[in-house]
Amino acid sequence: MKETEISLHLTDKQENKPSSLLYDHKRAFASDKEPLGAIIGHEAYIILNIERPYPPLLRRPAYPASPKSREALETHIKELLDLGVIRKVGHNEEVEITTPVIVAWHNGKSRMVGDFRALNTYTVPDRYPIPKIQIALTQISQAVYIATMDSLKGLHQNVVTPRAIKYLRIIVHCGVYEYLRMPFGIKD
């Protein structure tokens, strides 16, 4: 809780309650030892609506990339490896599905994006209702506590099942990697 704004209208008990709650669930948040928190007790899964052997559409080569994009990819790969979000797939491991990645540039900054469109066409959707924003705003209008967080890496807090990891393999010029946490771009 480095950046915290606390209302002057709270009692001491109300002021201490969020800190206590965060402390009780500290394993879900990033720390110096664990730079990326994890959702405990839930693993994200992916179910495909096809059987093996998988169609060639799911085994694609790396996209061509400029030297600048290759350098950016290497930086992103290293960061994700250091965070434990991905791991390099060994040369002796069977690889049936690979998803190429692209580098998207916005305001001079790069972002690595997996092109999961082919995989998403064979994924069984997980149906759940998305709440309407007006209802959500009405519900929080009477809240005593409102917390916001930076969710840039929020999706990476979802651990995926061992079976799903095999579907989440990406290919770049420097090798094949698999996501151990949920990447952006997956349908579910």
Image (tube, rainbow, N blue to C red):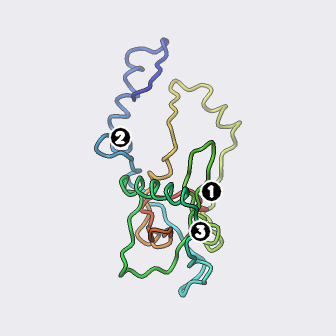
Residue drawn at point x = 61 percent, y = 65 percent: 115
At label 3, counting other C-alpha atoms closer than 10 Å, the crowd grade (few under 14, some 14-19, many 20 or more) is: few
Please tell me which of labels 2 and 3 falls first in the chain. 2
Please tell me which of labels 2 and 1 falls first in the chain. 2
- Amino acid type of the residue tagged 1 in the rendering: Tyr
Q: Residue furthest bottom?
A: 53
* Residue position for label 2: 25
Q: Is residue 22 above or below residue 110?
A: above
Residue drawn at point x = 47 percent, y = 54 percent: 76
* Residue position for label 1: 128
In three-dimensional space, the C-alpha distance between marks 2 and 3, rounded to whole angstroms, equals 43 Å
In three-dimensional space, the C-alpha distance between marks 1 and 3, rounded to whole angstroms, equals 37 Å
Instruction: Give SS at disc 2.
Output: loop
- Amino acid type of the residue tagged 3 in the rendering: Pro
Q: Is residue 166 above or below residue 77?
A: below
At label 1, counting other C-alpha atoms closer than 10 Å, the crowd grade (few under 14, some 14-19, many 20 or more) is: few
Q: Nearer the viewer, residue 171 or 49?
A: 171
Whole-percent x, y for residue 137 in the image: 66, 33
Instruction: Give SS at disc 3.
Output: loop
